[in-house]
Amino acid sequence: MSENDVAPVTGLEREVDVAIVGGGMVGQALACGLGSSALSVVVIDPMQTDAAGRLARVKAEAEKGFDPRVSALSLASEQILRSLDAWPTMAQLRVEPYQRMRVWDGEGTAEIGFSAAEQHQAHLGHLVENRVTLAGLQQALEQHDNIEWLGGRTIATLSEPDTDGLESWRILTLDDGSRLKARLVVAADGARSATRHLAGMPLSEWDYQHHAIVTTITTEQPHQQTAWQRFTEDGPLALLPLAGNGHQLSIVWSTSPNHADELMAMDDAAFSEALGQAFEFRLGRITEVDPRFKFPLTQRHAKDYVAPSLALVGDAAHTIHPLAGQGVNLGLLDAATLAEELLASSELGLPLGELQRLRRYQRRRQGENLQMMATMAAFRHLYGEVPPVVHWLRNVGMKQVAATGPLKRLLVRHALGLEGDLPQLAQRPLEQTGLG
Ligand SMILES: Cc1cc2nc3c(=O)[nH]c(=O)nc-3n(C[C@H](O)[C@H](O)[C@H](O)COP(=O)(O)OP(=O)(O)OC[C@H]3O[C@@H](n4cnc5c(N)ncnc54)[C@H](O)[C@@H]3O)c2cc1C
């Protein structure tokens, strides 16, 4: 199929087992997790392309530079993407492992470092452009006959659940007027999920009062495969190493809305100087800056991740401050866990949309996601306050974590995705676990 063709949806009410609305990283990962099973799966997404088209475009864009949307993928995410067979394509495109992490407080003297070696790991994670992950996943997705990509379409309406005996379903109308009957509809359509909205799922939202500026920079000194993060009074500044000439980094600068506006209004020279100062010139001067983009940061959390014949995954269920670099990592764990539960239901011949079964997925993921969100909210709060006692507390806290081996190890293992209720797709072969 060429990039401009749209596969027709045949029949007024075509039936599928699972309709995934949103073919982002999380929606595609879920689809791949259901690959080669007895379930019929469709992925509905505005992006009208096939894997070959996407791959060609990513390769052409890579020649020109880096995607400003970059994610720090944890070891658990890497394992999920390997299990789904997306990783080989991603590795062929470009991924950058990072070996170390340095975090410090610009107002005090506290500093903490983590290294792969001390965790008995080959690396702490990878920095990967989102478009690379998407290309790897779509390549993997097309290997499965039971999955169909319905590109160039969005969801328009969603019915209430209907039931017949044990079986329940929902009817989706797409923006081209076609209708689908799905035993399970999965909202994977991102932070402003139309599916979640159409289903009337309640959401709590909290404005972080931060805007994030993202761009790619080149620094005088090499990045040393280290992820750098400095906490300032206005918010955290992260510099993340990219594959390339060893001097290119992706930045995520979270700061107050006013400061973000000022930074966006600067020319490249003034911005480079301001960034260099904020980063204490730890990698020397900033010699090049790509175009900058700004996003408001909002924490969102759906009260329930499931309803009859409906499940929310990824950003449709929760969005989190990027300071921990955990958003898509949590989403990929949602996808892997939901796939595991759905395959188990299917093998047992149980209805896919049954609320009681879907709640197993919610129980496994909601606590983990809330815990990560609470930690980020506490950090945001701690670094948004100025009284001296708060300075003192956070410096002492960071020093204690730095000094206490087991606590530091536990914190890091959680961030790497090596702790908690891991779905099978995220479990690594024993020899790679670092527990030996
Ligand atoms: C500045 C910044 C930095 C970040 N850094 C990191 C990081 O380092 N590590 C990390 O883990 N996370 C990071 N994140 C978070 C991460 O980007 C998100 O968590 C992740 O993209 C969510 O993936 P998703 O597939 O759930 O949603 P999305 O990526 O939003 O994908 C949603 C998909 O749904 C489609 N869609 C939308 N509406 C419809 C509709 N009506 N019908 C059909 N399809 C639809 C869209 O086209 C898209 O393909 C960062 C976020 C920000 C803002």
Image: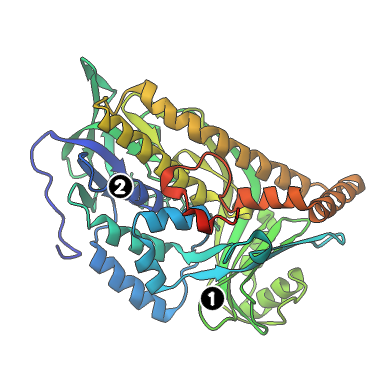
Residue lying farthest top? 165
Q: Horizontal and vertical percent for residue 267?
A: 62, 76
> Would residue 305 be visible to someone looking at this image?
no
Q: Horizontal and vertical percent for residue 131?
A: 40, 64
Question: According to the image, label 2 marks what residue?
Answer: 31
Q: Looking at this view, is 164 or 380 the one in front? A: 164
Q: Horizontal and vertical percent for residue 90?
A: 39, 67
Secondary-structure class at tag 2: helix
Give the residue type at disc 1.
Asp
Q: The C terminus is located in which quarter?
A: bottom right
Residue depicted at 39% across the width and 38% down the height: 338
Above or below for 19 versus 391: above
Residue depicted at 34% across the width and 23% down the height: 308
Give the residue type at disc 2.
Ala
In-image side of 268 versus 350 (left or right): right
In-image side of 260 versus 162 (left or right): right
Secondary-structure class at tag 1: loop
Q: Which mark is residue 290?
A: 1
Q: Horizontal and vertical percent for residue 212?
A: 60, 57
